[in-house]
Image: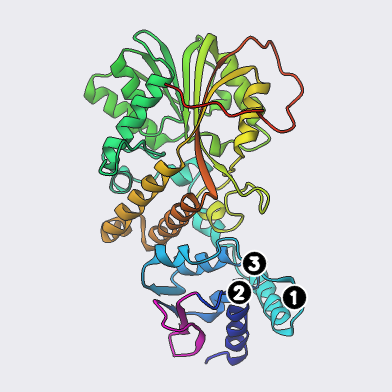
Amino acid sequence: MVDRTLCEDLRWAFGVLLPKALPIEIRSRDGFLFFRAEAPRYVVTVNAPEALLGLAHPTPLGNLAIAYASGALEIEGDLLSLIRGMDLDFRWPARALLNPRALRLAARYARAALSSPDHAAAYRRGQGTEISFHYDLPVAFWRLLLGPELAYSCAWYDGPDSALDVAQRRKFEVIARKTRIAPGDRVLDVGCGWGGFSFHARAIGAEVTALTLSAVQADYVRGRAAGDGAEVRVVEADFFRFEPDASYDVIVAIGFLEHVGPDRRDEFFGRIRRSLKKGGRVLIQTTVDSRRKRRRGRLSEGFTNRFVFPGGYLATMSEIAADMEAAGFELTSVESLRENYVRTSRAWFDNLCAHEAEIAGIIGTERFRVFQLYLAGFCVQFESGGFQNYQFLAQVGTATRRGPRPGQGPTSMLGEST
């Protein structure tokens, strides 16, 4: 039986929350109309209105995403274009919070939350650590998503016609050039992923240690090293417990800092500095949050942090630069890769959609939808400048130890390294 009161309250909520110009129609499977703009280009079918009680949350977008991932909503139309047309930080206006309909929805949402298991916890149950939860999916899935290079970080495009795999190899070349890797150098690849940069550095003649906390990634890199005859040392360990047997000439961390919370960045950079030789170089490539004035750095307090990157955190560019300088590094280059990440994330999204049936068969429909939403949101955030991606290049400077943390980060931006 249709809960008419609930449906009416939800219709009112959509009218408050959604921009009138958003070309969308939202209706229940039995025909109840929740929202309709003129000439809608997207149709959302609600299979279970009760799943929309999450609209009562102060920042409801994450709960709408959960409803879609769980199958409570079906969307007809271009998902990426739909998300582009939405405010990804939309929330309840203060004037509406005391409306009787809002209060009734909030009460029902609270009761449902108390009586139902946490969907995110159930989704993650049995998945192990935060790292294994995301990264220890079958390599077959990652290959379909990321392409043959299995590089899960921003690529470096040379021109408008560059392919993703070519751009990923170019990224490895740029990093090796910036860090001046030479034959015989000792190189530590922190959070090595599937080993793309590790094998590139080994091909130059470096002595490479590939460090990862993911058992699946470690097994893959070991297998590739054995198959290629490449002498890459693979260590499956937590960076914060890893004790190097000697100092390194170069340390690279590509897409790792996002997994280091704000309370451990000092320790992270301190450990890197102590692991480098005098004059050693470090390159950090990481995504940062450019919207700190409007929200906290937690990766989407709702959906993304709960379902994609548990424990993930995005610092700001100035915080990272300040932390590196305070740890005794001399910053020599800070370079934005945002436009490259627009293309990289779009290539991943296109790969995901192109292999929908195969990927859903590997990781399941719900997880496919999680990645679909996460990557669509990623595309939009990089397009809008909400997220940025930087390469921070530094060397062990003359500073002996930490001084007072600069209040505003670096006083100037340094140009591109050549």
Task: Specify whether 17 is left or right of 208.
Answer: right
Question: x, y percentage for residue 89?
Answer: 60, 61
Residue visible at 38% across and 35% down in the picture: 217
Mark 1 residue type = Arg
Residue located beneath label 3 in the image: 91
Q: Is residue 344 above or below residue 255?
A: below
Residue located beneath label 1 in the image: 95
Residue visible at 35% across and 13% down in the picture: 206
Residue visible at 64% across and 17% down in the picture: 328
Q: Quadrant of residue 105?
A: bottom right
State the residue in front, 221 or 265: 265
Mark 2 residue type = Leu
Dot 2: element: helix
State the residue in front, 393 or 76: 393
Q: Quadrant of residue 270?
A: top right
Disc 2 to disc 3, C-alpha distance = 7 Å
Question: x, y percentage for residue 404?
Answer: 77, 23
Residue range (magenta): 22-41
Q: Quadrant of residue 358?
A: bottom left
Around disc 1, counting alpha carbons within 10 Å, would you say few (fewer than 14), some (14 to 19), or many (20 or more)? Answer: few
For marks 1 and 2, the one nearer the N-term is 2
